[in-house]
Amino acid sequence: MPKREPSVVHVAIAVIERRGRFLICRRHAAKTFGGHWEFPGGKREPGETWQACLRRELREELGVTVRRIKPAGRLYHRLGKREAFFRVFRCAINRGTPQPLSSQIVRWVDRARLSRYKFPPANAPLIAQLSR
């Protein structure tokens, strides 16, 4: 029996900026929104704090540890019967060099070029805010 996706998901998103450029990742083609770009992060496990989720996801996805995790907003998106609640955090890499451990590509992108990349619809308000 296939694993059933929950109808409500909570996702932590990391906005990592270095020298005026943001770290983004390209999703694998086989995943939902495959081929789209995204900010690193992922789904929060039951009982997990937002910060613990972000630390775990960045370690698993990119092989890095982070510091200075600061709340930077919230997003909500509905796709069919599924709802996604996002918490956005600004943070800095403490240790490691980002590697594409669970994505196809990682890239540092200038603020002015963010809107040229195709992100999932839920990211539109964040892209607009960061592109200013």
Image: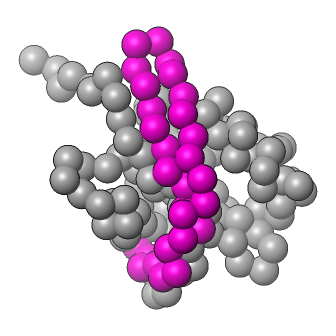
Is 59 left, or right, of 73 in this rendering? left
Q: Position of residue 34 (x, y in %)?
A: 53, 33
Residue visible at 21% across and 22% down in the picture:
4
- Residue drawn 74% across the image and 46% down it: 127
Q: Quadrant of the N terminus?
A: top left
Magenta segment: 63-90
Which residue is at 77% across, 69% downward?
21
Up the image or down, 124 lies above or below 55; here it is above
Residue 7, given in percent of the width and then of the height, sits at 32, 22
Is the residue 131 above or below the residue 4 in the image? below
Quadrant (top left/top right/bottom left/bottom right) for the C terminus = bottom right
Majority secondary structure of the magenta segment?
strand
Does the stretch in magenta take in 72? yes
Residue 90 place in picture, x, y as percent: 59, 68
Query: Is residue 109 positioned above or below 27 on the image?
Result: below
Magenta region includes residue 51: no
In the image, residue 72 above or below residue 96: above
